[in-house]
Image: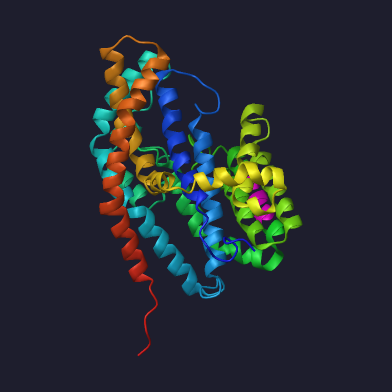
Amino acid sequence: MSDSRAGGRIECLDGLRGLAALWFLVGHAHILTGFKVPVIGDPELGVDLFIMLSGFLMVFHYQRRRGREPWEATSTWVTFWVRRYFRIAPLYYVMLVAALTLGPFIYDARMVIDAFNGVPPQLASRYLDSSLSNYLAHVSFLFGVSRSYSFRTALPDWSIGLEMQFYAALPFIMLIVGRVGWIKGITGVAALGALAAYLSHRIGYTFVMPTFLPLKMHVFAAGMLLAGALWTNERRAYLFAGFAGYLVIAPLGGEMDWLHQITRIVLVLTFFALIHTARLPSAAAKMARPVSEWLGNRFFHNLGELSFGAYLVHLLIMQPVIAYLIGAVDVSAPVRWALTLLITVPIVYALAWVGYNFIEMPGQNIGKELTKPRASA
């Protein structure tokens, strides 16, 4: 039994989380500077890695705690929801106020960028709607299920609403898994999600971004299966990985090109290899183990801890920087991309460090304190 299955920490997850946030940042720099590079220039792939990690981590922590926090008890649901709320909400609320306050400034920068790149301009409502209804939709985290408000701030927060929907659904998904088994339960939920997404599209209830849980349930499901594989035998673990690879691309059909399909499968297989090094053939394990250990070092641990803050803040910094560079220097797209990262990355991670230490950590501590078991009188 590996340490992770025994309840230990999987260090490489910090590195994967940190790389996912960095991938998203770098991908946005590609798009906004007009420097087109396949795969690494696609921030959506970074988001999918984030989503898969989320599905994995929620199940991993559930399995570790199930002895003392069984999902059959509704008190466990409340504990889980409170912890997740205080993990996400404090920093998000601060960044939400910043984004809606700075909306006009960010909008002006985005108009310069879109005009320079010759692309249709972003809707003004995304940046300029400081109405009470927009605040309430985001403070309540209900914006993800609304076509009107799902993409209506300068933050890349469409995935935050998606995450909160997943957290709301997770206890019920795990009850299903407990009754019918991992593969039937997870693939069944993913299939229901695909059906709901199809019906939503058929009736015209479509979204600018995939903020509605059924649109990304298959990616969460892939991560959940990879976590479930930790608590099964070697043969079934490979079966779980195969189903995870299938799930992560099956609902996409012909909507994505083959390069994206292959990349998603590679992400699943790489994820599996890094967390199941002890189950790999010796030659493969010899290659995977050093990478897994490297992703668990102190640098990547810190990168992972700062990933949420970096994810939230980077567009608020990056768009004004790119707008300034467009007006100030006449350089090629690759050079503009490199200058953007050179300026943006230090600022983003400095702000993420401040947010982590003074907002995220205190928020998490509040959640832990509220859900700490009380000694009986």
Q: Measured from the top left, where is residue 80 in percent x and y?
A: 45, 65
Stretch of the chain drawn in magenta: 186-195
Task: Specify the quadrant of the image occupied by residue 186.
Answer: bottom right
Q: Measured from the top left, where is residue 260 in percent x and y?
A: 61, 30
Q: Measured from the top left, where is residue 99 in percent x and y?
A: 28, 38
Query: Where is the N terminus found, in terms of image quarters?
Result: bottom right
Was residue 191 drawn as part of the magenta stretch in this picture? yes
Was residue 192 drawn as part of the magenta stretch in this picture? yes
Main SS, magenta region, reads helix
Q: How many marks?
A: 0
* Left or right of 289, for residue 110: left
Residue at image x 38%, y 25%?
Answer: 122
Residue at image x 25%, y 53%?
Answer: 358
Q: Is the residue 305 above or below the residue 321 in the image?
A: below
Query: Where is the C terminus found, in terms of image quarters?
Result: bottom left
* Left or right of 241, for residue 150: left
Residue at image x 56%, y 53%?
Answer: 56
Residue at image x 53%, y 42%?
Answer: 49
* Left or right of 188, for residue 300: left
Q: Is residue 272 visible?
A: yes
Q: Residue furthest bottom?
A: 377
Task: Specify the quadrant of the image occupied by residue 265.
Answer: top right
Q: Is the residue 302 above or below the residue 86 in the image?
A: above
- Asked whether 310 or 105 is in front, the reply is 310
